[in-house]
Amino acid sequence: MSPINLSKWARLKSPWVLHFNSGACNACDIEVVALLTPRYDVERFGILLKGTPRHADILIATGPVTRQAALRLKRIYELMPEPKFVMAVGACASSGAPFKKCYNVLGGIDKVIPVDVYVPGCPPKPEAIIYGVTKLFEKIKGGS
Amino acid sequence: MNPNIFFRILVFPGFLFLFVLILFCDWFERKIMARMQNRMGPSYTGPFGILQPLADYIKLLTKEDIIPHHARQFLFSLTPIISFSIFMLSIFCFPLDGINVFSNYGFEGDLLFVLALVTFAHFFLFLSGWSSSNPYSGIGAVRILMQFIGYDIPLIISAIGPAFLAGSLSLAKIASMQTIPFALLTPWTFILFLVALQAELEEDPFDVPHAETEIVAGYGTEFSGRKLAFIRLAKDTQIVFGAVLTATLFLGGPYGPVFSAPPSLWFTIYFVLKVLFVIALLEFVEAICARLRIDHVVRGNWRMITPAALLSVILTVLSAPYIRLFMGAPI
């Protein structure tokens, strides 16, 4: 196994996630938390929820980006060490959905930071989020 | 000088063997925690997810290494490695396969040496949080110091019990005296020792130094990449150290009945089994307990656990003649 393959294998087997809510209604957050509970238990795949952006590989962002949260979201993204990936979970995070033209909402997560995977749904089922993670894995495998 | 010594230090039973044991114990802990919480735990990384800790470490080693602008750069880079190496060195002093890594039976008083080394290692963990100049790390670091200053005292006092019964401060001698484990002869000391150890290892109900819901990740908040890998490794080594210390002082260390040659093989098997038993015990307590409040942790130590440790030593000393009669040792 070459060193590049080894590091890619490790990256695929131990993705640690950070969950950030940039103005969601909490529905997506409950679904994200459901991933960690016994029914779905993503620790099977090595996914751990971390408290600090310094430890995380994947930023799971939920909710539309409000003007107040935009700067915080950007700063948290910049705190994460490379290589880092972003998942936008939920319809609001993907596009802003019903809050799109609100005076206090910028739009989806991609208005502030680059997004790798969009998971639609209001809220998406935990299965859909796991499917999104596997899509992200395909992206990691494909790229360098 | 023994030419074998490099093999013993680097491969077996030194660095490589202990490294594999540490990774295995990490997986074992996570699996026990998961099963206690009705989950699966790591399952798909290698057979039964056994390579999960290895994948975590390799991933952390390949990640970007950030040093915050305000951190004390020298200490911030150095402390994770130093605390890991001190924990490793202190495990080297234990009789792992009958004799210790340096190919002898240790010296009289290496119990105190090991306990002093570990206090140093805890101090470096404190420095790692303090040097990162982050409010969460600072609070976590101060909590470590407060907890360790308190709980080191009952830990050392309860470690005196087995040393007194064995009549020696040498780890190998304490371990080899136990034809019947001290855990059965003096259960009062054993239970107190486990409680103090739980606090030393920052496990529930004493995990205030890295309480995730209050102070993000405690002293490790600012660490990323390679430094985080070493901080995690230091934590895992610390847990294995705690289990090795308990196994040596209370469960008879590596010694047990030998059924065939070579004895060092049997001693290694007994040693690993006892370490895993202690880790299972510690993780069981961690899984069933909630976090105590910080003032309860401190008050519980100074009001209850330290006096109880003193009482347990008195009880051990008073009952020593009967226990020694039981052990078949000269009174």
Image (cartoon, coloured by chain):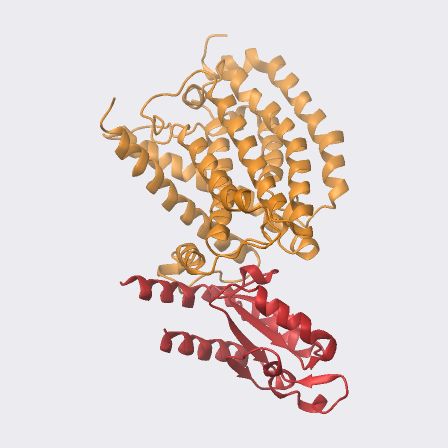
Chain colours: A red, B orange
Q: Position of residue A64 (x, y in %)?
A: 67, 82
Which residue is rendered at x = 70% and y = 54% of the image? B214
For this view, does B103 lie left or right of residue B274?
A: left
Image: A58 above or below B89: below
In the depicted structure, whether residue B327 falls above or below residue A125? above
Query: Can see residue B203?
Result: no
Q: How many marks?
A: 0
Decide if residue B8 is in sight here.
Answer: yes
Identified at 35% across, 60% down, the residue is B47
Q: Quadrant of the N terminus of chain B?
A: top left
Judging depth in this view, the residue of A83 and A138 nearest the camera is A83
Q: Position of residue B37 (x, y in %)?
A: 57, 58
Q: Nearer the viewer, residue A114 or B286?
A: A114
Residue at 75 percent across and 89 percent down: it is: A102
Left or right, residue B130 beside residue B175:
right
Q: Position of residue A114 (x, y in %)?
A: 54, 79
